[in-house]
């Protein structure tokens, strides 16, 4: 089995206004793994994901992509790093002034320096892959939430990322649209894509996660395979939390 | 009743002469002022602190002093510091300075209206700061700023009539001369008003076309 490490994050700390948001968080993601971050809101899941590609610059800690340490002060290196680390946001963040196709193509053209028609055909390929071959010419305002999130996934995939970070990709969606986005993520997972995902979709996490990381107050307090952490009588915080989610959600 | 010979022989030739001068003032100052406004607006929205302060101070002064006073300063006061402007140059300079200050406010507002998420998404894809501003922020901000910037151009068309204060013989100046010579104030200024109305109508039409040309679902119009 290939256990090559794609992403390694060590000792990430972040304070905002004197309040500790992330407290010494570390994680390692091997090729093809899906790590799922769960925890109560305000635990720091989103901040951790955004610290990994320095959208929120961490105060301290080291980030390694395939063994190479990221020098956060080097802007060129940081941009190059980000092209290899895909990011999916809770609120999609599609570029509002561009069609679905152009949303996917623009980074190929401006960052990768691809020619316009080459980028367009690549964009169409990626959109077809997430089931949107017939929606390429629509603007974000004309798409449903689930479609927007799938465009966002296509946009990240087009850059051929080594790992994708997903920040609660289904939390802003109407319940009936969650399925279509999870189906795409499931396809990616079975295709061997390396991912770190924050989510409240416990069934999804249980079924697909290689490992669950439970976060609380800025720390990763439990970590393990879903069948271990969620096993009956395991007495973990993770199980406790999921139990409460189920009670509330049912 | 209507004195057509007065219109044909005296008034219209003078006003047409003035119109050309007005257009020669308005078109370059609107263009240069717009470019200046975009630069100033970007500096005031994204620049380092000192640059923002400087831009804010400039805007505060220009917006706080009547344009007529600025014209007088440029035409009558600057020569005391050894800077001389002909009437046309003085008018143009003050219009560019003034319109840039006002435009910067529309541009700044539009830039600040772009959601942080748009910028984050671009950065997450590996865009540099300059690329993010050029390809993501400005195309969206321009659409939001367009109605306001158009409004400023309409203002400029009308405040260009102040140029006669520094003896620049544009539409208003020519009209005033004819009126004083003939004492036909009503006819002359009705005609001058009609000329401005025509210019503003044409400009509004063009601006509206421009808005339609760049319309996108999700940006106001559907």
Image: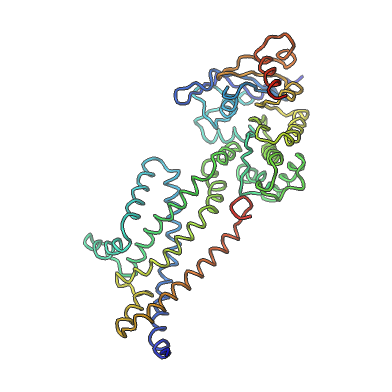
Residue B180 locus on image (x, y percent): 30, 81
Residue B60 lies left or right of residue A198; in this view the side is left
As rendered, which of B111 and A8 lies closer to the eye?
Answer: B111
As rendered, which of B125 and B186 lies closer to the eye?
Answer: B186
- The scheme the figure's colours follow is rainbow
Let me know if residue A4 appears in the view: no
The residue located at (45%, 58%) in the rendering is: B34
Residue A89 locus on image (x, y percent): 63, 34
Residue B23 location, quadrant? bottom left
The residue located at (34%, 51%) in the rendering is: B60
Q: Is residue A31 above or below residue A82?
A: above
Image quadrant holding the N terminus of chain A, namely top right
The residue located at (69%, 45%) in the rendering is: A143
Residue B183 location, quadrant? bottom left
As rendered, which of A53 and A117 lies closer to the eye?
Answer: A53
Residue B64 lies left or right of residue A216; in this view the side is left
Count of labels in the image = 0
Image quadrant holding the C terminus of chain A, namely top right
Q: Is residue A239 above or below residue A123?
A: above
As rendered, which of B8 and B184 lies closer to the eye?
Answer: B184
Residue A227 lies left or right of residue A19; in this view the side is right
Residue A134 locus on image (x, y percent): 77, 48
Q: Is residue A132 above or below residue B201?
A: above
The residue located at (72%, 48%) in the rendering is: A136
Residue B164 location, quadrant? bottom left
Let me know if residue B67 appears in the view: yes
């Amino acid at each position: 089995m290939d256990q090559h490490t794609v992403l390694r994050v060590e000792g990430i700390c972040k304070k905002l206004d004197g309040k500790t948001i992330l407290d010494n968080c570390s994680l390692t993601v091997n090729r093809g793994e899906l790590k799922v971050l769960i925890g109560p809101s305000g635990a720091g899941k989103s901040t951790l994901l955004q610290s990994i590609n320095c959208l929120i610059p961490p105060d301290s800690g080291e980030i390694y992509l395939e063994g190479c340490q990221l020098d956060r002060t080097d802007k060129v290196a940081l941009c190059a790093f980000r092209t290899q680390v895909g990011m999916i946001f809770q609120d999609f963040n599609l570029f509002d002034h561009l069609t679905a196709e152009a949303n996917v193509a623009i980074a190929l053209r401006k960052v990768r320096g691809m020619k316009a028609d080459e980028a367009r055909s690549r964009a169409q390929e990626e959109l077809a892959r997430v089931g949107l071959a017939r929606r390429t010419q629509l603007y974000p305002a004309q798409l449903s939430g689930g479609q927007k999130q799938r465009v966002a996934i296509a946009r990240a995939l087009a850059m051929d990322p080594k790992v994708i970070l997903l920040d609660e990709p289904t939390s802003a969606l109407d319940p009936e649209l969650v399925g279509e986005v999870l189906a795409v993520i499931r396809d990616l997972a079975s295709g061997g894509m390396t991912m770190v995902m924050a989510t409240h979709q416990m069934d999804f996490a249980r079924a697909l996660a290689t490992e669950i990381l439970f976060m609380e107050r800025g720390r990763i307090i439990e970590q393990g395979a879903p069948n271990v952490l969620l096993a009956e009588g395991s007495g973990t915080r993770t199980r406790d939390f999921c139990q409460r989610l189920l009670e509330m959600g049912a | 009743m209507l004195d057509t010979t007065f219109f044909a022989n005296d008034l219209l030739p003078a006003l047409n002469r003035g119109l050309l001068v007005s257009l020669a003032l308005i078109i370059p100052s609107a263009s240069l002022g717009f470019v200046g406004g975009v630069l100033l607006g970007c500096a005031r929205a994204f620049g380092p602190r000192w640059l923002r302060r400087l831009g804010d101070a400039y805007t505060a002064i220009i917006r706080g002093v009547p344009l007529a006073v600025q014209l007088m300063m440029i035409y009558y006061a600057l020569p005391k510091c050894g800077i001389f402007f002909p009437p046309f140059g003085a008018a143009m300079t003050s219009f560019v300075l003034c319109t840039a200050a006002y435009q910067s406010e529309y541009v700044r507002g539009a830039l600040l209206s772009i959601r942080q998420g748009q910028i984050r998404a671009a950065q997450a894809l590996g865009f540099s700061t300059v690329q993010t501003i050029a390809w993501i922020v400005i195309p969206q901000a321009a659409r939001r700023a367009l109605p306001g910037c158009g409004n400023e151009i309409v203002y400029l068309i009308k405040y260009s009539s102040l140029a006669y204060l520094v003896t620049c013989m544009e539409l208003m100046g020519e009209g005033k001369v004819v009126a004083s010579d003939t004492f036909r104030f009503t006819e002359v200024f009705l005609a001058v008003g009609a000329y401005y109305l025509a210019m503003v109508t044409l400009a509004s039409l063009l601006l509206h076309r421009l808005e339609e040309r760049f319309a996108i679902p999700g940006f106001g119009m559907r």
